Image: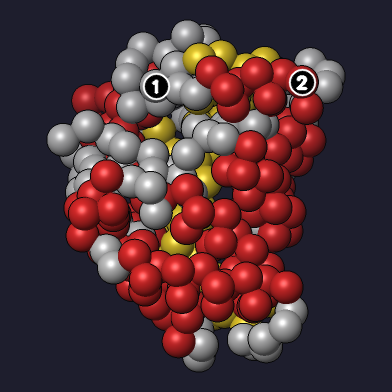
């Protein structure tokens, strides 16, 4: 099974990533600055999209060189136009090695492993290309809970879609067990209980739904009328016409370091 990014790279998807970057900026910045003493030579943003996370990685880490890697030509073109300055953006499938950049000593992986059907393979591959002593910083979802039925239905359907493609919506819950047999050593793992406004979350979900509802599997297996009702409900929540309170988002942040001696793996 090949990895399939069901969230798309159209204008709607790009705008969603901008809003997602804003919504999760504080937690991501904190994850990066906790390694404030590193001063990396090369920092790599894995699956950079339009580059918002690359900009944050560069600013928060003070890296001498920051490079965003992504397989979408459209996203890379957007990143180069949106992210002014000395950031670099290179086309590359981040699950493949070698990387088109010298060995990084800092890597950022945010909301990426959830889209991979064999995330442990990607983690092992990144360990092979990272510099000895490098840090890999990961932020993924461990759980999503809402009191609103439309939000719960969205999470149920999204989870079903991801299972179809061998992916895990709540991959954060499995993260710490994925480093066995790699060159990485877990040095920090923590769960963050984040309360995000349902309106902001619904805005992100609405953009996703309008993209993945055209997925061939979804068109065959999901009820079209039900998707229409769900879309209408998300519109009401996102616009503020219907109050859905807060979404409890449990995030898993993991920091791993590459062992200096590969023979230890």
Judge whether residue 221 can be spotted in this image.
yes
Mark 1 Cα shell of 10 Å, populated few (<14), some (14-19), many (≥20): some
Q: Where is residue 244 in the image (x, y as percent from the top left)?
A: 62, 86
Q: What element carries label 1?
A: loop
- 237 on left or right of 129: right
Q: Residue furthest left?
A: 1
- 4 on left or right of 39: left
Name the residue at 31% across, 42% down: 116
Q: Which of marks 1 and 2 is nearer the N terminus?
A: 2
Q: Where is residue 217 in the image (x, y as percent from the top left)?
A: 23, 50
Q: What element carries label 2?
A: helix
Q: Where is residue 48 in the image (x, y as percent from the top left)?
A: 57, 32
Q: Where is residue 230 in the image (x, y as percent from the top left)?
A: 46, 73
Where on the picture, by quarter, is residue 189?
A: bottom left
Instruction: Judge by depth and name the residue closer to the eye, 37 or 110.
Output: 110
Disc 1 marks which residue?
93
Disc 2 marks which residue?
81
Residue 5 badge:
none
């Amino acid at each position: 099974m090949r990895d399939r990014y069901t969230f798309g790279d159209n204008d709607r998807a790009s705008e969603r990533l901008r809003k997602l970057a804003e919504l999760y900026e504080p937690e991501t910045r904190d994850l990066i600055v906790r390694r404030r003493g590193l001063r990396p030579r090369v920092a790599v943003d894995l699956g950079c999209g339009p580059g918002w996370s690359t900009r944050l990685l560069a600013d928060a880490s003070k890296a001498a060189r920051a490079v965003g890697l992504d397989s979408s030509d459209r996203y890379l073109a957007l990143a180069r136009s949106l992210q002014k300055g000395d950031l670099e953006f290179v086309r590359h499938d981040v699950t493949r090695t070698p990387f088109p950049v010298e060995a990084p000593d800092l890597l950022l992986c945010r909301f990426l492993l959830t889209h991979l059907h064999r995330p442990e393979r990607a983690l092992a591959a990144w360990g092979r290309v990272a510099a000895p002593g490098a840090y890999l910083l990961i932020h993924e979802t461990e759980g999503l809970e809402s009191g609103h039925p439309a939000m719960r239905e969205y999470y149920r359907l999204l989870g079903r879609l991801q299972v179809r493609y061998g992916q895990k919506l709540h991959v954060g819950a499995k993260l710490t067990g994925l480093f066995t047999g790699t060159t990485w050593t877990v040095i920090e793992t923590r769960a963050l209980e984040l309360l995000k406004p349902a309106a902001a979350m619904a805005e992100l979900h609405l953009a996703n739904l309008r993209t993945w509802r055209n997925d061939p599997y979804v068109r065959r297996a999901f009820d079209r009328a039900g998707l229409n009702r769900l879309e209408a409900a998300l519109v009401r929540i996102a616009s503020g016409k219907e109050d859905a309170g807060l979404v409890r988002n449990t995030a898993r942040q993991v920091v791993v370091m590459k062992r200096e001696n590969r023979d230890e793996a």
